[in-house]
Image (spheres, rainbow, N blue to C red):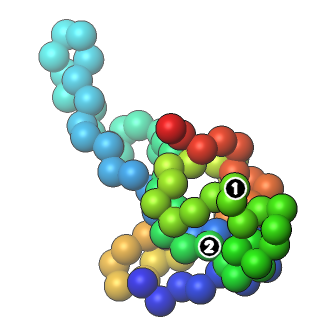
């Protein structure tokens, strides 16, 4: 991937959703919908992993809900990632 977060930050990647259909059969492409605020954690900073209070809170592979306008979008090798603060993570999806 090539991104190593610093401070109390994590790197997340949007989960791709399938195209949706309305009840009348109209296909809604992903570009017509709002982006979901659910993503998968792909990297966690050393500060989070080394802190006794936060090291067990979140890990790579977790699916999380994050604040709608949080983070910074980054594109590396045609893959889109978002770097967010740990405080911007609202919940872990189980």
In which quadrant will I find the N terminus?
bottom left
Which residue lies at the image location 19% right of the left edge and 10% below the top edge?
24
User: How busy is the neighbourhood of tag 1: few (under 14 within 10 Å), some, or many (20 plus)?
Assistant: few
* Direction from residue 2 to residue 78 in the image, left or right: left
Which residue lies at the image location 74% right of the left edge and 54% below the top edge?
88
| Figure check: 46 above or below 68 | below
> Residue 4 placed where, x, y %?
59, 86
* Direction from residue 78 to residue 61 in the image, left or right: right
Which residue lies at the image location 37% right of the left edge and 74% below the top edge?
79
Label 1 to label 2: alpha-carbon separation: 11 Å
Any mark on residue 68, and which?
none
Nearest to N terminus: mark 1 or mark 2: 2
Where does label 2 land, which residue? 44
Where does label 1 land, which residue? 57
Q: Which label sits in the foreground, 1 or 2?
A: 1
Where residue 54 sits, quadrant-wise, is bottom right
Where residue 48 sits, quadrant-wise, is bottom right
| Identity of the residue furthest to the top in this view | 24
């Amino acid at each position: 991937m090539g991104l190593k977060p610093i401070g109390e930050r994590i790197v997340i990647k949007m989960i791709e959703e399938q195209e949706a259909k309305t009840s009348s059969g109209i296909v809604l492409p992903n570009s017509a919908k709002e982006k979901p605020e659910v993503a998968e954690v792909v990297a966690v900073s050393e500060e989070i992993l080394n802190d006794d209070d936060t090291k067990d809170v979140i890990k790579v592979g977790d699916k999380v809900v994050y604040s709608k306008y949080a983070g910074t979008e980054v594109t590396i090798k045609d893959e889109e990632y978002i770097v967010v603060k740990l405080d911007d993570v609202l919940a872990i999806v189980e």
